[in-house]
Image (cartoon, rainbow, N blue to C red):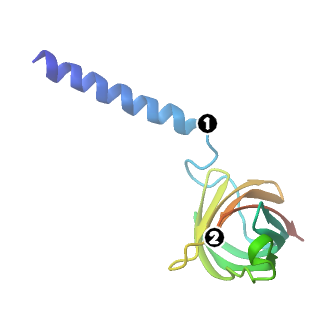
């Protein structure tokens, strides 16, 4: 009986820890932002390259659909190779974080929205830092 009670207390503590840890992130809960619109900016990644990026997004509730246009080229040993994870995307907004993927490809991203700016990481062959502004 004592071990069952101890296990229950440990599980409750673990659950509360997870809840408190999640409270500090912008990607939890219902959407607090709307990412609908045309966004343009830049990407860069060490040992990979840099270029421009565009998002055309439509948000309904928490769900987002749209298109990603990625331009740029590789640096280093693969200099001149094209990096092009462009195409349609599906995503969602939780709190102030826009997350997406381009299934079945391995392109995915998590961008934090602050007003008319989004910034964060998009993973292609490596992690790239992305910063975009909504065009009005």
Q: Is residue 125 left or right of residue 4?
A: right
Displayed quadrant of residue 33 = bottom right
What residue lies at 76% left-to-right and 64% top-to-bottom?
Answer: 47
Position of 75 relative to 20 (above/below): below
* Front-lying residue, 121 or 80: 80
Displayed quadrant of residue 67 = bottom right
Q: Are marks 1 and 2 in contact (CB under 8 Å)?
A: no
* Front-lying residue, 93 or 119: 119
Give the residue pinned by disc 1. Answer: 24
Q: Quadrant of the C terminus?
A: bottom right
Q: What secondary structure is marked by label 1?
A: loop
Looking at the rendered image, the disc whose residue lies closer to the viewer, 1 or 2, is 2
Displayed quadrant of residue 128 = bottom right
Give the residue pinned by disc 2. Answer: 125
Position of 3 relative to 26 (above/below): above
Expressed as whole percent of the image width and height from the top left, the position of residue 85 reads 67, 79
> How many residues crowd mark 1 within 10 Å: few (<14), some (14–19), many (20+)?
few
Expressed as whole percent of the image width and height from the top left, the position of residue 98 reads 65, 60
Position of 75 relative to 25 (above/below): below
Q: Let me know if residue 57 appears in the view.
A: yes
Q: What secondary structure is marked by label 2?
A: loop
Q: Is residue 73 left or right of residue 67?
A: right
């Amino acid at each position: 009986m004592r071990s069952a009670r101890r296990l229950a207390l440990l599980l409750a503590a673990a659950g509360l820890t997870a809840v408190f840890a999640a409270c500090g992130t912008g990607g939890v809960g219902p959407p607090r932002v709307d990412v609908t619109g045309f966004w343009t900016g830049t990407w860069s990644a060490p040992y990979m390259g840099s270029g421009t990026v565009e998002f055309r997004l439509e948000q309904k509730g928490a769900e987002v659909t749209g298109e990603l246009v990625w331009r740029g080229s590789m640096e280093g040993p693969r200099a001149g190779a094209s990096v092009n994870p462009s195409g349609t995307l599906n995503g969602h907004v939780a709190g102030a974080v826009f997350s997406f993927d381009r299934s079945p490809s391995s392109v995915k991203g998590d961008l934090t929205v602050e007003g008319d700016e989004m910034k964060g990481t998009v993973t292609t062959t490596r992690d790239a830092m992305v910063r975009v502004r909504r065009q009005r």
